[in-house]
Amino acid sequence: MKGFESLLIEEIPALRRYARALCRDFSQADDLVQECLVRAVSRRRLWSRGRGLRPWLFTLLHNLFVDGLRRHDALRVGEEIDVDSFASGADEAAELLATLSDFEQALHGLSTEQREVLVLVGVEQLSYRQVAKVTDVPIGTVMSRLARARERLATSLEGEIKLTNIKRVK
Amino acid sequence: MNDGNPQLTEAELHQFVDGELSAARNRAVARIVAGDPALGKKVERYREINRRLGDFYDDRQSGPIPSRFLIALRGRRGASPARIAAVLAWLLVGGLAGYSLRGPDESAALVRPLPVEAAYAHAVYVPEIRHPVEVDASQQAHLNAWLSKRLDRTIAAPDLRQAGYSLVGGRLLPDGDRPAAQFMYEDAAGKRITLYVRRARHARETAFSHAREDGFGVVYWIDDGLAYALTAKADRDKLTAAAELVYREINP
């Protein structure tokens, strides 16, 4: 039987994909994965081999992400906002956005909750029921987030396709 | 059940794409979609979204697995009773099989024995397609110089072509608070073998020892102040032959 660490190692690529859907950049995503691995090792007794490892790890990662957001919000209450740094950050973000395709821009424009459901269903192939468990919301909410997210992305694809057609005409 | 119902809800279209429908309803929906170009286009869009997401979140975009993940995997477990038992078990097996038992030097390494460390590093980097190594074999002189500098000992990737393995490259790894090196090789069929090298805690030399960690075979030994561990999914004889070649290359 494989050791727990080896099983975790095999899940690292999936954890990184999911974390990237939640976080703004790669390094934040990897921080989150690292925290998740530490937590998984310390809570290994709470996982039983009969249960899928991936949904369990995703649940840990989701909760760490949500806890992190709460910590962040709590910090922000007493914090003064540095307008300059905020502005330059927005400039950088705008510059980055300009290099992305319509589809990628639309993906960035979704809420974190929508992107999360899209990736868990469309990339990681989790069932709606599993996604509901990981994200701790009812199945109906999973379905409505998915539908709304796909609606917006479909519109962006439509835009891209029209654009390529115009280019071909030229 | 409305398995044959010609009416279709928007939600069902998503369920159809995601394989969430019962087999009977799935067949019915497939028929309805096939007969309605507008619905067919929608389904195709949703599938394309999944493909685009797959590309966007492709593993290769994430870059190599950071070595700090290895540290995370070890967690704060330290010397848990189960771990100590496991380590004692392999020490005992080694002893029974007639290998020279390591003395105080290996007890210092009780928490992170060489074969365990080497097998983790092997398991993490061998499956990598894009970033198996930090410095590849085309820059071998740089690789050797860099790792020698970091380990503060002259080391060089041994030539294992006699055993059918060519050098892929190498990387620096954390070994607790110290650096360690990993050289990766592969044979003509793409099967990979790694040589893990770190400074020995004590300078005493040992014979070859064997361990199995999570399905990998590991041969390890200490020679001239360096601890070596050769890891592969190979049987013991093949691994021992490769280890002997490593030893001969290092001590010509």
Image (cartoon, rainbow, N blue to C red):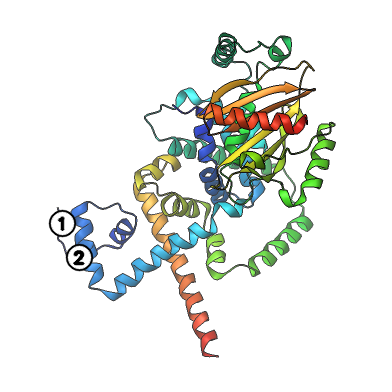
Q: Position of residue B139 (x, y in %)?
A: 77, 50
Q: Position of residue B42 (x, y in %)?
A: 35, 69
Mark 2: few/some/many CA within 10 Å (<14, 14-19, 20+) = few
Q: Which residue is found at the position 64% from the left and 42% from the top?
A: B185
Q: Which residue is found at the position 38% from the left and 42% from the top?
A: A130
The residue carrying mark 1 is B2
Residue toward you, A85 or A65 = A65
Residue toward you, B249 or B86 = B249
> Can you see residue A70?
no
Residue toward you, A103 or A113 = A103
Secondary element at image label 2: loop
Question: Please, is residue B67 above or below residue A81 in the view?
Answer: above
Q: Position of residue A107 (x, y in %)?
A: 53, 61
Horizontal relation, residue A52 to residue A166: left or right: left
Amino acid type shown at disc 1: Asn
Amino acid type shown at disc 2: Gln
Disc 2 to disc 1: CB gap under 8 Å: yes
Q: Chain of mark 1?
A: B
| Image quadrant in which you'd find residue B182 | top right
Q: Position of residue B134 (x, y in %)?
A: 71, 46
In three-dimensional space, the C-alpha distance between marks 2 and 1, rounded to whole angstroms, equals 9 Å
Mark 1: few/some/many CA within 10 Å (<14, 14-19, 20+) = few
- Which badge, 2 or 1, is on the more N-terminal residue? 1
Q: Chain of mark 2?
A: B
| Image quadrant in which you'd find residue B38 | bottom left
The residue carrying mark 2 is B7
Secondary element at image label 1: loop
